[in-house]
Amino acid sequence: MSIDIARLTRWTGRTEEAQDVITPRLMHSFAATFGRHLAPHGADEAPLALHWCLAPPISNIDACGPDGHAAKGEFLPPVPLPRRMWAGGRIETLAPLREGDLVTRRSRIGDIAYKEGRSGPLCFVAVHHDYLTERGVALRERHDIVYREAAQPGTAAAGAPVTATDGEPADLTWEMEGSPLLLFRYSALTFNGHRIHYDFPYATGTEGYAGLVVHGPIQATLIANIIATLTEGAPIRLDYRGLSPLIAGDIFRVKAKRLADGGVRGWTEGVDGQVRMEGFHRPA
């Protein structure tokens, strides 16, 4: 497939703004979805990573693409590759979000890059977000999106090589059931229509996955919260990346380990003991 990268880079610097309110219902729904797998926080403070539930893009149902995502070409560049995936990013907390806050998200398209991967062409788009309340900037984020070719019939969905843990000990371990119910609730919280999270025939037959796929931000939410538990609520500066899809249906583990330099490594681990997503918190 030919990709006009010069045309796509015209989207660099494009901005948009959205607002949402942290309601008691959102706070309760988020806490009920993740249960005990959240870092301690004040009674009126939003749990860490709740910001991914705020002001989700909402498009008319007849304006969605075949994968369930909103059509591209407005804020996001019109990358012609059909498969869109959450690749990773960075979150930096500056101050807590609180129940009742009117939150403004200011977004900007950053780098747009193209490369040939082992499984075909890849296009990477970085989106930068600032989340502001009346008290100032509460959180900064870079969201890395990767676009890929459609899976060929009979082939498995490609991902980066998974990493074995080799029995690496962790300072804290959580177990989580990657159930369809978890995926459904999170999709509802974030108004995420991507069919790989709820449509088994589509996820397996069209996209080539072994089953329904656990959302990248579910894993990143758990990694951020287990790290914040170890750091006792200190501000988080987390760089994270997805290594391989985490398939729903089994118990998976979330682990964190303190590092000699004062940082913390966090990761999710499939039932096979392989790392699916990892992140590193480096204190400022």
Image (tube, helix red, strand yellow):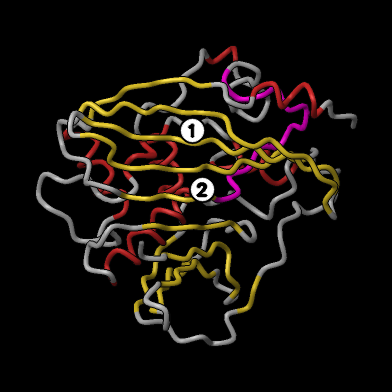
Q: Is tag 1's residue or tag 2's residue first in the polypeptide sequence?
A: 1
| Amino acid type at image mark 1 | Asn
Residue 228 magenta-drawn? no
Q: Position of residue 218 (x, y in %)?
A: 44, 51
Instruction: State which quadrant residue 148 falls in.
Output: top right
Q: Position of residue 199 (x, y in %)?
A: 59, 38
Instruction: State which quadrant residue 230 falls in.
Output: bottom left
Q: Residue furthest left?
A: 43
| Amino acid type at image mark 2 | His
- Residue appearing at x 54%, y 87% in the figure: 167
Q: Which mark is residue 192?
A: 1
Image-based side of 101 in relation to 82, left or right: left
Residue bounds of the magenta highlight: 75-88
Which residue in the protein does label 2 denote? 215
Looking at this view, is 55 or 273 the one in front? 55
Q: Position of residue 273 (x, y in %)?
A: 57, 77
Please identify the quadrant where the C terminus is shown.
Answer: bottom left
